[in-house]
Amino acid sequence: MGRRQRSLDPQAGPVAEFALRLRALRESAGTPTFAAMSRRVHRSTTVLSEAAGGVDLPTWATVEAFLEACGERDPAP
């Protein structure tokens, strides 16, 4: 089992709010591990974890991979 993610304040700004939305999507997908997500979309666990970390805004390619790893089939911009 991996480490717990640090708490995020949705009032901290748009990056934190976006990360919280990614976390909610992951939770609705059954909270797959980042390793399982990584295997599914061929992205590193670090990149996927950082996307939901709330420090930096992830690239669109990373967002698409994150969505796909959570079972979303049509990640429109």
Image: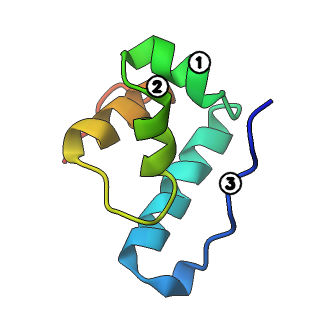
Q: For the view shown, which residue lies furthest in the bottom direction?
A: 11
The structure residue drawn at horizontal position 23% and vertical position 48%, both measured from the top left corner, is: 59
Q: The residue under label 3 is which amino acid type?
A: Gln
How far across and how far down the image is residue 7, in percent? 69, 68
Q: Which residue is mark 2?
A: 69
36 and 64: which one is in front? 36
Q: Which residue is mark 3?
A: 5
Task: Look at the numbered disc 1 and give the secondary structure of its residue.
Answer: helix
| Number of on-image labels | 3
Q: The residue under label 1 is which amino acid type?
A: Ala
Q: Which residue is mark 1?
A: 36
30 to 51, vertically: above or below: above
How far across and how far down the image is residue 11, in percent? 53, 87
Task: Look at the numbered disc 3 and give the secondary structure of its residue.
Answer: loop
26 and 57: which one is in front? 57
The mark that comes first in sequence, 1 or 3, is 3
Q: Residues within 10 Å of mark 2 (few under 14, many from 20)?
A: many
21 to 74, vertically: above or below: below
Q: For the view shown, which residue lies furthest in the right direction?
A: 1
How far across and how far down the image is residue 32, in percent? 66, 27
Q: The residue under label 2 is which amino acid type?
A: Ala
How far is disc 2 from disc 1 in space, using C-alphas?
8 Å
Please tell me the numbered disc located at residue 8.
none
